[in-house]
Amino acid sequence: MTTKTADAATNPATCDDAPLLAVRDLRVTYRQGDHDVPAVRGVDFSLAPGDTLGIAGESGCGKSTMALSLLRLQDRGAEVTGEVLYRGENLLTTRWVRLRAVRWAGASVVFQGAMSALNPVRTVLDQIAEPIVLHDKVRRREAARRATELLDRVGIAARRARSYPHELSGGQRQRVMIAMALACRPDLIIADEPTTALDVMVQAQILELLAETVRESRIAVMMITHDLSLLAHTCDRLAVMYAGRIVELGPSRQVLQQPEHPYTRALSRAFPTIGDPASRRAPAGLPGDPPRPSETGTGCDFAARCPEVLPVCRTEEMRLWPAGPDRHAACVRVLPHHGGKA
């Protein structure tokens, strides 16, 4: 897999390849009564063909909202601004006819809740074959053949192809969702907790399938999960989100092994280390909860929970600053006048 630099994530001109997806100042705001509630606040990143980006962070940090808004799949009532450039075309302003084509043939989504995403009155074979017929303009028999092959690739026997979603286990339904995402050979897959319902053996099979697809077809993958070790092993880069913003960005292993932002350090220490009884009996934690979107204000949103907080953290606006080669972090400690490396 090709590892892109953090500079490439915020400046596509630095990429060897033109970005497949370029997100610029993405903001998602919900209206609640007389108040605007910001759920995503100025997110920037790029994905080139063959690039893999992991998105990490606690529940409520805006990961899924950000991912769904890329293809305008967010909840009704949300205002989305900024730019989502797919091959240079802004998906936030393009016509619905064009957007529907991009959603399958260009970019596809693996949703977290497979049962709510699948049609309960149609067989899984029909649901996988339908987008192939519509977008690839092939006969239904050919589409059915390709759908059966996809089911086999994700570990579902051909005899289960005519099953309805309720006749499959949760793990099998999740595998059907992954097969659907691959149906039209998209350039980009957005995977929201794609292996949550899978056992360890099937999880490894699915991750290898995604990795093989990236290698062979140079698709881009954006993966959202709470499993940091999974992101470290499957994604080239890692973006850590907090309170609707990216607070750290860089090569996955570097971000987890040598985190620059205090929040990333807290996340990486929250998991026990295999073979270390002390960490298993008393894993490090992080007190409190992320602020609600309506509670964000001036200064660093992590200041109230940060063990390394400085007075300036409560007053200065945070943004992603260079934090070393291929690294960015939204923490004043990475700045030279605070002892940082930038």
Image (spheres, rainbow, N blue to C red):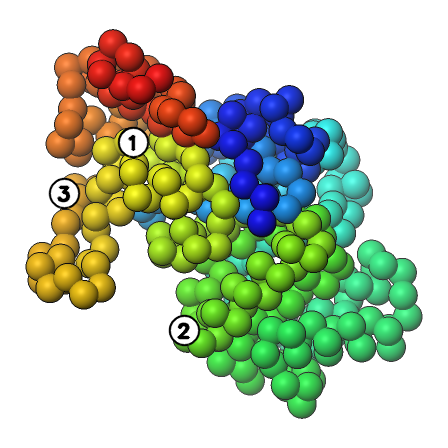
Disc 1 residue type?
Glu
Other-residue count near label 1 (Cα within 10 Å), few / some / many at <14 / 14–19 / ≥20: many
Q: Is residue 258 left or right of residue 177?
A: left
Query: What percent of the width, then of the height, locates residue 49?
Result: 67, 43
Q: Nearer the viewer, mark 1 or mark 2?
A: 1
Residue at 33% x, 44% y is: 256
* Residue with the most extreme top position: 337
Disc 2 residue type?
Val
Q: Where the C terminus falls, by quadrant?
A: top left
Q: Secondary structure at mark 3?
A: loop
* Residue with the most extreme bottom position: 159
Residue ID for mark 1: 260
Q: Quadrant of residue 12?
A: top right
- Mark 2 or mark 3, which has the lower sequence index? 2
- Mark 1 or mark 2, which has the lower sequence index? 2
Which is nearer the eye, 181 or 20? 20
Residue ID for mark 3: 287
> Marks 3 and 1, how far apart in space?
19 Å
Q: Which mark is residue 62?
A: none
- Mark 3 or mark 1, which has the lower sequence index? 1
Q: Secondary structure at mark 2?
A: helix
Q: Is residue 60 left or right of residue 90?
A: left
Q: Secondary structure at mark 1?
A: loop
Q: Say if 166 sits above or below 295 in the image.
A: below
Query: What percent of the width, then of the height, locates residue 213?
Result: 65, 59
Residue ID for mark 2: 200
Q: Quadrant of residue 209?
A: bottom right
